[in-house]
Amino acid sequence: MKFINLLQKELKELINAQMIASLVLIMAILMFVGNITQNAIDDTIEENNNPKINISDRDDTDFTKSLIETLRSTGAEVKEFDTEGDGYADILKNNDIKNLVILPEGLTETIEKNERPQIITVSRMTSAAAMSNISTGNSGAVELIQKSIADTIAESSGITTEELELIENPITLQDNTVVDDKSAEISVNSIVNKVMMQNTILPIIVFLLIMMTSQSLISSISNEKIDKTLETLLSSPVSRTSIITAKMLAAAVVALINAAAFMVGFSKFLKGASADAISGVVSDTMGVDEAIEQLGLSLSVGDYILVGLQLFLTIMICLSVSIMLGALVNDTKSSQTVIMPIIILAMVPYIISMISDINTLPMAIRIIVYAIPFTHTFSGISNLMFGNNTIFICGLIYQIVIFFVCMFFALRLFNSDKILTISLNLGAKSKYNRKKEKTKD
Amino acid sequence: MEKVLEVKGLTKQYTKVLAVDNVSFDIGEGEIFALIGPNGAGKTTTIRMISTLLKSTSGDAVIAGYSINKEPEKVREYITYLPDEAGAYKNMTGTNYLKFMAGLFYTDPNKIIECVNRAKEICGLGERLNDKIGSYSRGMIRKLLLSRAVMTKPKLAILDEPTSGLDVLNAIEIRKMIKKLASEEKMSFLLSSHNMLEIEFVSDRVGIIAKGHLMVTGTGEELKQRYNALNLEEVFERVVIENEIH
């Protein structure tokens, strides 16, 4: 009952209007950006499926007319423009268009002479953003024009369509991917695109959770010290272990709420931003799931439970380290800077896991990186996927050991005099020192 | 008079500093005992050991029959502690703070309500108790904390500099409150203060502490006679000088 009272107080302090508002705002921003990206991709796909081709026929021959008809017959929306000269900026501006394909004068004659003809394309660039410059209008048209010209040349040279097809694509490619002793008939890129989302979301969420959980517990302890409410609390008839357990539990609950919110926000964001979204609509991805299954890369329920356990251990390690760091703080400024060791320890494996495979690093560096307990969580999914079960289990055991060691020292510190007597003044002078100096005056 | 607190040879040695050296005194039921001394004399360390916040290096203190070394959890049921310059949770309302603190002493909801009502009556903050503590003045916070310290009717209320930083009127009000609780409800108090006038007015007995040693104890009148002094300030000065000479 007394513990519930303590827990309620801690939860009320952590889950306040400010925290809820910032969480909602972050989720809204992630979803908003995800929606914008998704819409841009949808537009691109739509344009790909129903290309809008702007064309200017300066040659005006039967061949170019039939070329334009061929473009129309593919379902493309073709608009013709009368243009002259090479003032392309004015041409786009006057016709209020973003792109244009120009069939220059003499095109038919060049083809008839068996020479290589030139096609002119003009595209307006409005920003450096990747999505704003994806325009399939010109490239689609050029592809179709090339094919038509190739057919014409082939026909005049007595080459059949099948022979032309063979010349253009002399090989067929069969992609095979091998993982350990298993193989599947699929390209590596298809697999990477499919698993990218879960491998990207988890490290981001782990990193954010480490930051937020540590900061909330450090603030909770340091605020009690700075406001001198800790002394009142410690002199009341509740055990110190109950006090610290309530603080840890409240911080863990808040971490879970944050994790759920980030999971939803980032899923939406990455769904919009990842290439998976495009491939899911444009190409047939049927078979990728089967290939992942065949390669043994799919995670079972048990695997997800192990990953969850590892995430839980990471949070618990953070909390136990935060107790010790919070105990060192005696002023507000220090409470903000004392989190630095945790940030560095989380940042190193986070960055490495995003850009490289930790298991391929040189042995000495690998040992150093794996000595950071958070590393095992960042590389957890990858290790389980690729069958590095020994590394995963060793990591899990290592995290359990580190947690108990940290917790032992944290409880020892909290149950000793040091919780009230030690301080680390990284920032401004502590309240205690200021008071002492004032009294001396 | 029944003894509520018996301090026996209490000592605290930090790594390099002997903060409190063999301090002994006792406090009877309904008695107000004040520890006075210069900065760094060992007042707060003594108080923190008695409040079970710090562990003693040697010696013991027995409160309501329980040892601070052997049964600190039990001791905490009979004491309350108000630290010097203590704050309260700024995001809580005054009433919620009192409920939270009462909930650390009792699990019975009726007992909790009883404590809160008593604190409300003592602090006299009225409707302001429904406001967040962050909006309170220093005097209001001190009144709230003092009412919190006595709402559970502890055997011993330990108050470190109870009126520090308060204006004259608020300080007088709090002193009167302490005296009333001691005389009418037989609550015992252990105070520490720099303010000799306050100590002379409010305390039944005084202990002068310097450099970790408890030099002398007695009533204000006894000490004034013994040191041929007009007030406690002079007593304090002579005790400290005498200690330096010897």
Image: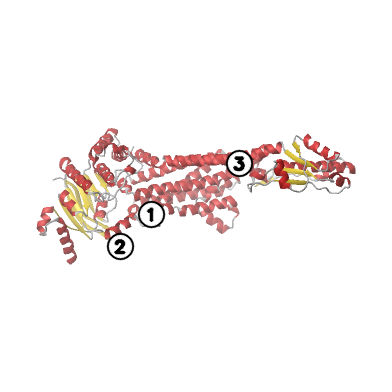
Q: Where does residue B11 sit, x and y in percent of width and height?
A: 24, 57
Residue at 51% x, 48% y: name it.
A207
Residue pointed to by mark 3: A37
Tell me: A248 left or right of B3. right
Residue at 85% x, 46% y: name it.
A106
Three-letter amino acid code of the residue under disc 2: Lys
Q: CA gap, disc 3 to disc 1?
A: 45 Å
**What label sits on residue A104 in the rendered view?**
none
Q: Tag 2's secondary structure?
A: loop
Chain bearing mark 3: A
Asked if one can make out residue A267 in the rendered structure from this viewpoint, the answer is no
Q: Tag 3's secondary structure?
A: helix
Q: In which quarter of the image is residue A254?
A: top left
Chain bearing mark 1: A
Q: Residues within 10 Å of mark 1 (few under 14, many from 20)?
A: many
Q: Do labels 3 and 2 share a chain?
A: no
Three-letter amino acid code of the residue under disc 3: Thr
Residue pointed to by mark 1: A328
Q: Where does residue A176 sit, x and y in percent of width and height?
A: 71, 45
Q: CA gap, disc 2 to disc 1?
A: 20 Å
Q: Where does residue A70 sit, x and y in percent of width and height?
A: 80, 37
Tell me: A384 left or right of A9. right
